[in-house]
Amino acid sequence: MTSENFEFKLIATDGKARRGEITMPRGTVRTPAFMPVGTGGTVKAMYMDQVRDLGADIILGNTYHLMLRPSAERVAKLGGLHEFSRWQGPILTDSGGFQVMSLAQLRKLTEKGVTFRSHIDGRAYEMSPERSIEIQGLLDSDIQMQLDECVALPSTPKDIQRAMELSLRWAERCKVAFGDQPGKAMFGIVQGGDVADLRVRSAQALKAMDLKGYAVGGLAVGEPQDVMLEMLDITCPELPVEKPRYLMGVGTPDDILKSVARGIDMFDCVMPTRAGRHGLAFTRRGKVNLRNARHADDPRPLDEESPCPAARDYSRAYLHHLVKSGEALGGMLLTWNNLSYYQQLMQGIRDTIEAGRYTAFTEETQAAWTQGDIPVFA
C-alpha cells in the first residue's frame, strides 16, 4: 500500500502503546518501527536485500556523513540515495546536527548555523537550517529532520534552555525551507534535556507549527534510562495524537519496549549493527557475547527457532571462532542476527498491541532475556 501523500493512521492502541501505519509514495511503514541505520548509504555488513527481507520498512541515512563523502550533490547526480544504495523503500535522513556536535572539529555555533571542520580531512563546512534541508532534498529522502542543537547530559539548565530555544527558531526556518512536499515530511525535534518544563515548552511550540511528525531528541546521550522515560512521560502527552512520534537514537530492546508503552512509534539506533561487529548477539533469550571462551565448543546455534539463517544454521562455536579470528564473516552474521531479532521484536510489539496484550508481551519478553549470558539490565 502506498499513498501520493504522507499519511499516518492509528490502527489500534493498548494503553498508551500505538499500532499505526505511515504511508508514502515509496511504501508503507508499519509502526512501531525500528529503522536500521545506514550511516553512509549502507547498513554496515548487510546487503539491502537482506535488510528488506528481515522486515524493515524504512532505513535511516546520515546527512553529515553523506555530505562529506561522497557529497549530497554527487548522490543527487547519481539518482538520489534510493538509487545510489539500491534501497527502494522510504528513507529518513537526520539533519546532521548531532554528528556536527559530536564528531566535527573546531565547531562554531551561531544563530545562522554551525561552521565546522570535517573529522575526515579538516575541510571547512557551514551547516545552516536551510542547508540541512537542501542536502536532505538532494539525497531525496522521504522524511527529513530539522536542524537542532543537541546537548549532552548532564548540562546546566541555562545551556539546555539556550539550545532548546535555538532549535525552535531553527525549526521555523527548516519548515520554510522544506515548503510543501505532499509525499514527504519534515519532522520537528523536541529538545529540553532533562528539564521537564523545557520539554513541555518545546513540544507545545513545535505542535503549533503543525508539522507532519515529531521527534524526541536529546535523550540517550548520557542520562540514565529512568530519566529518559520520565521525559517521555512528560513529552508524549503534549504531542498530537494523529502524528507519528520518533525517539531518536534509541536503543536497547528494553528501551524500545518501555518507550512504546509511553506512545513512541519510531526508533533508530546503531546498537544492533555495532554490537554485531564487536561479537555481541541479541537473541530472544538475551544477549550472548561470542568472544566468551564458554562458546568455543558449543555446537548449538544462537536460536534454533529463529527464521534468520545466521541465528539458526551456524554453531556458537563457529561464530566464536570467526569473532576471535577477526574474520569479516563473524560481524556479518551477527549483524544479520541482531537486525533480525530487532525486527522480530517490532513485529511482536505490533501484533500484541493489536491483540490488546502488550503488557503481557513485555513481561514475557523481559523474562526470556534472563537466559542469555550477559545481565540484561546491566
Image: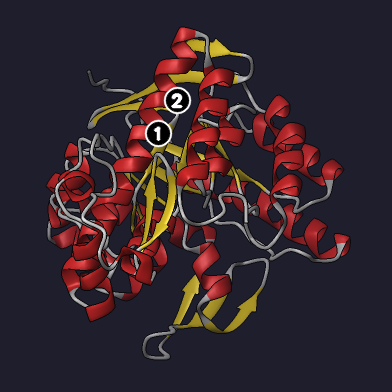
Considering depth in this image, is 300 or 89 the residue closer to the camera? 300
Find out whether the residues at labels 2 and 1 contact each other: C-beta distance under 8 Å: yes
Q: Quadrant of residue 55?
A: top left
**Compared with residue 192, is residue 15 higher up or lower down, i.e. above or below?**
above
Residue 345: assigned label: 1
Q: Is residue 271 left or right of residue 341?
A: right
Residue placed farthest to the front in the image?
Answer: 297
Few, some or many C-alpha atoms within 10 Å of disc 1 (few <14, some 14-19, many ≥20)?
Answer: many
Residue 349: assigned label: 2
Element at label 2: helix
Q: Is residue 139 left or right of residue 106?
A: left
Residue placed farthest to the bottom in the image?
Answer: 122
Question: As shown in the figure, which amino acid type bears the numbered disc 1?
Answer: Leu
Gap in angstroms between the C-alphas marked 2 and 1: 6 Å
In x, y percent, where is residue 333? 21, 58
In x, y percent, where is residue 252? 51, 48
Question: As shown in the figure, which amino acid type bears the numbered disc 2?
Answer: Ile
Element at label 1: helix
Considering depth in this image, is 287 or 74 the residue closer to the camera? 287
**Compared with residue 267, is residue 157 higher up or lower down, i.e. above or below?**
below
Considering depth in this image, is 196 or 129 the residue closer to the camera? 196
- Residue at 68 percent across and 30 percent down: it is 236
